[in-house]
Image (cartoon, rainbow, N blue to C red):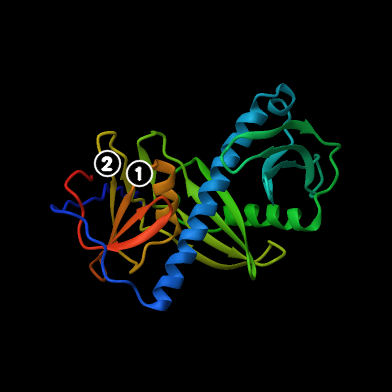
Amino acid sequence: MAMRVYIVGMMFLGLVQIAAPAGAAEETALREVERVGTSLHELDRAARAALKEAEGTRAFRRDDRVAGWVADRHPDGLSFTFVGMEPGSSQPLALYRTVIARSGRVLEDLRRLPGEPLDARLAAQFAASEQARLTQRTRCSNDEETLVLPDAEGWRAYVLPRAAFPDVYLLGGSYRVELSSSGDAVTGVQALASECVILQNKPTSGALLFAEDRATLPNELHVYISQQAGKPLYVTTTPNGRTWLIQEGRIHPVTGIPASAG
C-alpha cells in the first residue's frame, strides 16, 4: 500500500483564552491521558539513556544475544534489564542491567548479569513487547521503539515510529496495543494517529500545531510529543471543532492559537 505523508498545521490570530471547563467525564479522561503521556515520555527518556550507557560498553556491543529490554520502576528511577536468549532457547534471560533516573541521569553503571531467567512479571513485560511488534498495523518507519506500561488488566504496549530527521515527529504508525497479564495475547489495537501523518518542529516556532481528524479529545501521543519537543502543542480535534493546548504535560481547552505558533 502506498504511504501518504502529510504535514498538518493551522494558524489562528489573536490571544489564546482558556475555554470553559470540561464536564466531569471529560476531565477524568484528560487527566488519564496526561498521566499516560507523561509516563511514556519519562520511560522513553530513561530508555534512551540506558541504551547509550549500554552501548558505551564493548561487551554489550559485541553480545549478539541482546534482543530488547524491560524496565522496572523504583522510587528513585527505573531499572533497565537488557534481555536475550541463548541459541536454540525460547527462555528470556537477564543479561545486563543499569538504573536510570526519570530525568535520564545514570544512577548505576551497566553491569553484566549471570544470565538467569527473568522473573514472571518481567518475562510477561518482554512477551508483551515482542507480541506488540508482531501486531499487524500500518508501518511508517523501519525504525520503531516499543514502550510497555502496566495496565489494570495487563499491559499497554506503545509502538512508536522514529523519524530520520530530528525536526520531524512521526505520529502516523503509532499504536497502542493492549495485552493480557501474561503478555502473550493481544486484547486490543488502537492507532493513535491516521495513516503516516507527521508533525514538523520548526526551530523558529514557539509552539507546535496539529489537526487530529478522527478523535474528539487529545490522546497520550500528543502529550508525549509535546514533552519530547519541549514545546506547547496545539491540537485541533476536527470532528468537534475544538482546540486544545498541551503544555508541560497538561491539557487545556482553548479558544484560539497565537500567531507565533506553527
CB under 8 Å between callouts 2 and 1?
Answer: yes
User: On the picture, is 77 further left or further right than 245?
Assistant: right
Q: Circle 1 sits in a helix, a strand or a loop, which is it?
A: loop
**Residue 60 % position (x, y):** 72, 28
Residue at far left of view: 13
Residue at far bottom of view: 24
Residue visible at 51% across and 65% down?
A: 189
User: On the picture, is 135 further left or further right than 100?
Assistant: left
| Total marks placed | 2
Measure the alpha-carbon separation of dots 2 and 1. 7 Å
Q: Quadrant of residue 211?
A: bottom left
Q: In which quarter of the image is residue 183?
A: bottom right
**Residue 180 % position (x, y):** 66, 67
Give the residue pinned by disc 1: 231
Residue 206 circle label: 2
Q: What residue type is labelled 1?
A: Lys
**Residue 115 % position (x, y):** 84, 39
Q: Which amino acid does label 2 sit on?
A: Gly
Residue situated in front as seen by the camera: 113 or 24: 24
Name the N-terminal-most of marks 2 and 1. 2
User: Which quadrant is home to the C terminus?
Assistant: top left
- Crowding near pointer 2: few (<14 within 10 Å), some, many (20+)? some
